[in-house]
Amino acid sequence: MNSILAKARRAALSQTPRICRVQLEGLVVLKIIRHCTENYPTPVTGQLLGMDNDQVLEITSCYAFPQDDDDNSERESSQSKYQMDMMRCVREVNIDHQVVGWYQSTANQLGSFLTGPWLETQFAYQDNLINAVCLVYDPQKTSDCTLGIRAYRLRESFLELFGKGDLSSLSLQRHEIDSRSMIEELPVTIHNSSLAKVLLEYLARQPYRTPGLPTNFLKEDSFMVEEQEEYETMAFVNRLRITDSSNYESALQYLSYDLDELAKDQNKYTLFLRNFSRAKALQADALRRKRLENLAKGEEKVPEQEILAQLLSNEPPRLESKLLIHEIEEYSKTLEQIIAGNIIKQFANGSVEVQSPRILFDNP
């Protein structure tokens, strides 16, 4: 009965229009940044609320999950009670209370987030809500003046295999799933209300004033111009600052660790293939005897795919290697972005020093 209900629910979910992009309210972005920054470097999670409008997932509100140190059973019960209380509160204040996904921070992992627990959590969301997404916030990238927030979901092919628990190399190869095709990224846009846009435009047009400066000082036009020029100069210099070398070291350490783990996993799989090839003759004989028995009984031939699946029943799990490869790719991209940005800044610094050395050296 439960399997029939599950199939009916999945069939109903499959008819739901799939979203193509995610729209975030500016207040949601600020809440996520504040929650992740206050708990840095501890990774945190939270719930996303909103609605799906045609092919756009509109995220209008969110709230944080509490950080509990209790055991698993007590933590699950407390989080369930907390979520029910929060949903009741948002309904009372007339806020969108439809769950559309969750968010998490990468803490100090340099953008890496794809792990076994992440896949299980995202599968639980998408198994009930086909358009559920996960927002991944990277605080280290945001500290470099680039908003590091991205939206991900599991691909339909991988979602089906993960639900069946069939993650052997044969199934992954049959469905053409590798480290890059397990998940897909959705474009993210930020939406602000008209009042928020007016406020931002108003603040952008205001002259800079040193904090703590008396208000009557602003009456001097020359002083205001000088303060504004100094602020713009320092803002320009800050854009050319080279990224701290600790980011290089962290990325290289994580990359080295994952490469070592991947090498160990490959050695295990190589040993399995070696033993598998040694027993190939015995397996062929067993297959031939099985076919002769079926012919004698008048039964159908044993499908080769089924036999191959039985032979690969002792195969080491392949999902871990896919996750390691994905992490290695993420760390490599992070290193590439940091190095490319620093090279550009170094050339820009050289040009500025030649044309106007005072800009970089006259200011304290």
Image (spheres, rainbow, N blue to C red):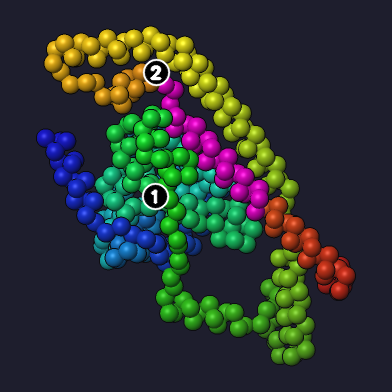
Q: Tell me: 75 left or right of 322.
A: left
Q: Position of residue 358 (x, y in %)?
A: 87, 73
x and y, in percent, of residue 78 in the image: 33, 40
Who is closer to the viewer here, 45 or 138?
138
N-terminal label among 1 and 2: 1
**Residue 265: x %, y % from top left:** 53, 25
Quarter of the picture holding the C terminus: bottom right
Horizontal arrangement in the rendering, residue 196 relative to residue 100 (left or right): right
Quadrant (top left/top right/bottom left/bottom right) for the N terminus:
top left
182 vs 296, nearest the viewer: 296
The amino acid beneath tag 1 is: Arg
Q: Which residue is mark 1?
A: 153
Secondary structure of residue under mark 1? strand
Judge whether residue 108 can be spotted in this image: no
Q: Residues within 10 Å of mark 1 (few under 14, many from 20)?
A: many
- Describe residue 20's horizontal placement relative to residue 208 as left or right: left
Q: Is residue 110 above or below residue 347?
A: above
Q: Where 89 falls versus 3 (above or below)?
A: below
Q: Which region is colored magenta?
A: 313-337
- Report the residue at 29% width, 12% height from top: 288
- Label 2: which residue? 314
